[in-house]
Image (spheres, helix red, strand yellow):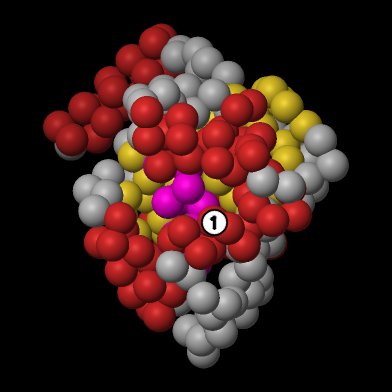
Amino acid sequence: MRPGELVLRASLEALPRGARDEWLDSLLGLKGLPADGTDLPRGCVPYLPCPVEVLLRAVDRAEITSEDVFVDVGSGVGRAAALVHLLTGAGAVGVEVQQELVRQSRELAAALEAPRFATVAGDAAELLRFLPTGTVFFLYCPFSGARLERVFEHLEDIARTRTIRVCCVQMPALARPWLEPLWEDEELSIYRSRAFTVDLRSDAVEVRSLLAQHRK
């Protein structure tokens, strides 16, 4: 850790657990819980900030470092992404559908003078496939159903290119063959993607078939 990261971590850990969230909000200049807008899609969970204590465990158990890119799915005002970036030096990307929260998150990044902290506006179920640089994906129960299924389809595609970690807060256990559990407690579950095997013979057959169709 760099000196600033060590100081921030030490400052948080010196506080009683119940005081850490208020202290962080004061540090980041966040005032109160923002209201959700009419652009929150049906089926999405209203914005709630993730507790600092859970974020600290995620940083430790997922072993997030400055080499990572942390992607917060449903990032709100950027609080979690900002804290993880400040604690680890990791790049941080928030994905948020509500325009007012996107605006506040970008203002926070500007105030922190953090060029590796950015917020992308839009529906994560559609946008994650365009964020292939992410290595740690964080979901604080942002939505469920078909939208969540599309998110995991995109994550599986990304995991085919490299190992990723997925941190889930207050979500049911994931039973997906391409993920293996790393850590679990009453609030937080962390998974790592398994290595994908490539069937070169199958790929060759598919290529030959495509070439044959092209010649027709």
Task: Tell me if residue 133 comes above or below residue 115 in the rendering.
Answer: above
Residue at 72% of width from left, 37% of height from top? 189
Image quarter for residue 148?
A: bottom right
Residue 76 placed where, x, y %? 50, 66
Q: Relative to 85, is 114 on the left or the right?
A: left
Residue ranking furthest to the top:
201
Which type of secondary structure does the marked residue at label 1 adopt? helix
Q: Which residue is mark 1?
A: 24
Task: Tell me if residue 177 comes above or below residue 23 in the rendering.
Answer: above
**Residue 61 visible in the shown view:** yes
Residue ranking furthest to the bottom:
38
Residue ranking furthest to the right:
186
Task: Write the start and end of the magenta stretch as one range.
Answer: 76-85
Residue 203 placed where, x, y %? 37, 19
**11 in magenta:** no
Residue 202 placed where, x, y %? 43, 16
Amino acid type shown at disc 1: Leu
Circle 1 packing at 10 Å, graded few (<14), some (14-19), many (20+), is some
Residue at 63% of width from left, 74% of height from top? 46
Quarter of the image that includes the C terminus: top left
Image quarter for residue 90?
A: top left
Q: Nearer the viewer, residue 152 or 169?
A: 169
Residue at 59% of width from left, 77% of height from top? 33
The secondary structure making up most of the magenta span is helix
Task: Tell me if residue 8 comes above or below residue 20 in the rendering.
Answer: above
**Residue 159 visible in the shown view:** no
Residue at 28% of width from left, 21% of height from top? 208
Quarter of the image that includes the N terminus: top left
Q: Nearer the viewer, residue 71 or 117?
A: 117
